[in-house]
Each structure stands twice: as C-alpha cells, then as structure tokens.
Image (tube, grey):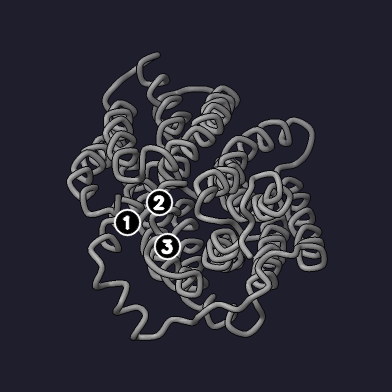
Amino acid sequence: MPLGTMRSALPHVGFIAVMVFLSMYSRLIMSPLLVYLQQDLVIGPARATRLFLTLSVAYSAAILGSGFLAERIIHRRTIALSAALLGTGLLIVAVAPNLPVMHLAFAVIGSGAGLYPPAGVATLTSLVSDDIRGRAIALHETGPNVAFVLAPLVVSAGVLFLPWRWIPAISGAAALTAALFFERYSVAGGFTGERMRLGNVASLMRKGEFWAILVLFSLAASSTMGVFAILPTYLVTTRGYEAPLVNTLISLSRISGVATLFLSGFLIDRMGVRRLVGIILAVTGVLTIGIGALTGNAMLAAVFLQPVIITAFFPAVVSAIADLGPPQIRNVAVSVIVPAVNIVAAGLFPALMGYLTEAGNVEGGFIGLGVCILAGIAMVPMLKR
C-alpha cells in the first residue's frame, strides 16, 4: 500500500533522496573540476567539454537499457548498482593519466547515473499516495539541488587542502559505501519494472503531453545542467571573475533554490502542473537571456536568480511523467524521455557552448537558449491540468 502521510514516508523518501543526490553530484562535480582537469591534461575548452558529451551518451544508453535490468533484479538493486558504478567512475577519474582514460571514467559515471532515473521515479511514485505526491517529489528533488550546492563548494574547499584528484577519489568511496547501505537496508523499490517494448513506447508517443514534457524538460534541463556545466568556465575565462567567487555565487543560488523546491511541492498539489510550469518558464527564459546580454552586477543577479526559479520546474515535470501511465510503465516513460533530454542538455549544449567560447560568442548561446525557453511556453497547454 502506498504511504499516505509525509511523516510515514519521510525516512523512505529521504533514503531515496540520498541516492539521487549521489547520481547528480557525481556528474556535477566534474564541472568545477574541469578547470583543473584542463590544466592537468593540457587541453583546451573544446576538448574538455566533449567529456560531457561522452558522459551524456553513456547516461542515455544506460537509461535505455535500465528497464531490462529492473525487470530482472528489481528497482532497489538497480539503484544500488547505479551508485556502485558512480563510485567506480569517480575513482577512475582520480587516477586517469590521459584524456582517453578520462573519457572512460566519464562513460562509467554516465552509465551509473543513467540507471537511476527510471528506477528512482518508479520507486518514489509507487511509494506514496497521490495526495502527497507533489510534496514527496519535492523532498526527493532536494537531492539534486543539494548536489548543485555542494559540488562547487566541495571543489572550492577541497583544492585549498588537497590535490584536485583527491576530491573524486573521496567522493567515489562515499558512493560505493552508499550503494552497500541502500541495497541492504532500504525497503523501497522491491518490485520489478518493465523493459521497453514497441507497444508501450508507441502508446506513450501517441500522447500529446508526452511530446510537451519532452520538449519542455529538454529546455529546462539545458538551463540547469547545461548552463551549470559551462558557467564556471564562462565566468572565469570570458568574464574574468575569480574561481572562488564564481563557485560561491553558484552554490548560494542553489541553496536558495531548495526553498523554491519545497514551495513548488505545495503549489503542484494546489495550483496544478500547467499553470506553475508556464510561470516558471517565462521567468527562466528572461533570466537566461540576462546571463548572456547583461554585464556587471545585473548579470551576476541573473546568474543567481535563474537556478532559484527553474528549480521549481522539476517536481512539476516528474509529477507530469507519473500522469502518463500506471507505476509499472513509468520507468519506460522515463527511459524514453530522459535520454533525449540528457543528450541535449548535458551533452550537445555544453559542447556547443565550448565551441562558442573558443569562437568568442558564448553570450549568444545563453541568449538563444532563453529565447527557446520563452517559445516553449506555447506547449504548456498540452500538459494535463
């Protein structure tokens, strides 16, 4: 039986939130480390940002195959395996002597992260009743947002005392430990998922809201994961700010976003997904344009506020995905949507921004993304009320 109160659901949802934190943190930490990685391997921004494309391709491939795994070893063990792969990949980063081995490490991290979303969403949304789903999803989403906060702070503090490679080494050991604890002690996710079949995929693709979620999720993820991947390098190398200031500003904005996240959980249950998503996209589009078009304190204000606002989007989109079908099919919906979103947001967009940085027109990338986000508002009416 799904849990009907937040009090009873809190410890179980909190445990899952730790696992999604690791899934996000393991990817995000590579962005503030990218400056040190470039110096260590003696490579430029274009070659360095292609590592994110490797990560995103592996991430998407793992999501596509996760249903076959969850069908055999249940969702809980799939989540534990995800964390184990994340830890392994981070340990490889810590010892990688050259760029090819670093690509291998990013591929392992991407594979581990990719196993989580289908199993995690299916586990979470089956664990709680619909009456508290918005709040449970908001609590779950604190994991990724805390990761956005801690990743730059860990790097900023860590490099003051340790060589940069110690940071992924310690993080990898923590992920491996969490994998063991989750597999042994969690009571959630004790059921199998469905693998992708032509019939269930075709059924999803006939729904108009499926395509709206796919496009809007891609835009929103580009404004978070994509922007986050390039933002430290952009502010340091193009705008001339000091790395500690940049990492602190980004972390503070993510801390503020956690409050927005909890607010969004209540707004979903009261306002509905459609109205909330429209407001979020309008404000986010304007702020993303501001990152590229403004200068000085106004630009820094846009950098700070943009993630605070877009954070509220993700509980809403997870709730919309849950409305696409019953619990058994939700991992399939995630397996179809998230790979495409990830290729765009965490792979193609950072790679494009890397090329634009070397071409001297990186500001145009932020402006173009903001315009696309504003245009995406036209698809909001396709979402369910």
User: From mark 2 to mark 1, how far is it between C-alphas?
Assistant: 7 Å
Q: Which residue is mark 2?
A: 317
User: How far from the left and from the top, in percent, is residue 242?
Assistant: 54, 23
The residue sitting at 81% across, 59% down in the picture is 177
Name the N-terminal-most of marks 2 and 1.
Answer: 1
Side of 143 where 158 appears, left or right: right
Q: Are marks 2 and 1 in contact (CB under 8 Å)?
A: yes
Name the N-terminal-most of marks 1 and 3.
Answer: 1
* Vertical relation: 74 (above or below) 361: below
Q: Which of the two residues, 376 or 204, is positioned nearer the viewer here?
A: 204
The residue sitting at 43% across, 53% down in the picture is 319
User: How far from the left and from the top, in percent, is residue 241?
Assistant: 48, 22
Q: Which of the two residues, 106 or 275, is positioned nearer the viewer here?
A: 275
Side of 199 where 102 appears, left or right: right
User: How far from the left and from the top, in percent, is residue 299?
Assistant: 36, 21
Element class at badge 3: helix
User: From mark 3 to mark 2, how far is it between C-alphas?
Assistant: 11 Å
- Point out which mark residue 213 bears: 1
